[in-house]
Image (cartoon, rainbow, N blue to C red):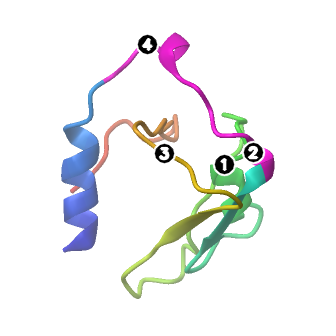
Amino acid sequence: MMAQNLASILLDLELNDLSNFTLVPQGIMKATASSNQNGEEPSKAIDGDTSTMFHTDWNNTTMPHWLDIEFATPQTIDQILYTQDPAVETVTR
């Protein structure tokens, strides 16, 4: 159910010009997750490097999966930049 909701949200996202983004400094963020694949740690979800990725453990099929991003100081977030794995053509429902 939650995966279907996320897929629906991602499919309805609006694409924006990246020049309008003000990024949260990486040094004040910490990422944790329900699980991760070796080499695809939660910190890679927020490292700003599009050649790395975060992924939950492929063998963990127990739902829900989650990714938590903690900020050292309060932040106002009005946009999220999501880069899809280039090996995946579409977000599946």
Work out whether mark 4 precedes mark 3 in sequence or the reverse, and give the earlier one: 4
In the foreground, 67 or 56: 67
At mark 3, the secondary structure is loop
- Compared to residue 50, the image places residue 41 above or below, namely below
Q: Residues within 10 Å of mark 4 (few under 14, many from 20)?
A: few
Q: Which amino acid is tagged 4?
A: Asp
Mark 3, residue position: 76
Q: Which amino acid is tagged 2?
A: Gln
At mark 2, the secondary structure is helix
Mark 2, residue position: 26
Find residue 26 and report its horizontal and vertical position in percent.
75, 45
- The answer for how far apart the CA atoms under marks 1 and 4 are is 19 Å
Furthest-bottom residue in this view:
62
Q: Is residue 40 visible?
A: no
Furthest-right residue in this view:
27
Q: Nearer the viewer, mark 1 or mark 2?
A: 2
* Residue at the spot 71% in from the left edge and 52% down from the top edge: 44
Q: Residues within 10 Å of mark 3 (few under 14, many from 20)?
A: few
- The answer for how far apart the CA atoms under marks 2 and 4 are is 21 Å
* Residue at the spot 32% in from the left edge and 39% down from the top edge: 90
Quadrant of the frame with the N terminus: bottom left
* Residue at the spot 66% in from the left edge and 70% down from the top edge: 37
Mark 1, residue position: 46
Work out whether mark 2 precedes mark 4 in sequence or the reverse, and give the earlier one: 4
Work out whether mark 1 precedes mark 3 in sequence or the reverse, and give the earlier one: 1
Q: Nearer the viewer, mark 3 or mark 2?
A: 3
- The answer for how far apart the CA atoms under marks 4 and 3 are is 19 Å
Asked if marks 3 and 2 touch (Cβ < 8 Å), the reply is no
Q: Residues within 10 Å of mark 1 (few under 14, many from 20)?
A: many
In the foreground, 59 or 51: 51
At mark 4, the secondary structure is loop
Mark 4, residue position: 17
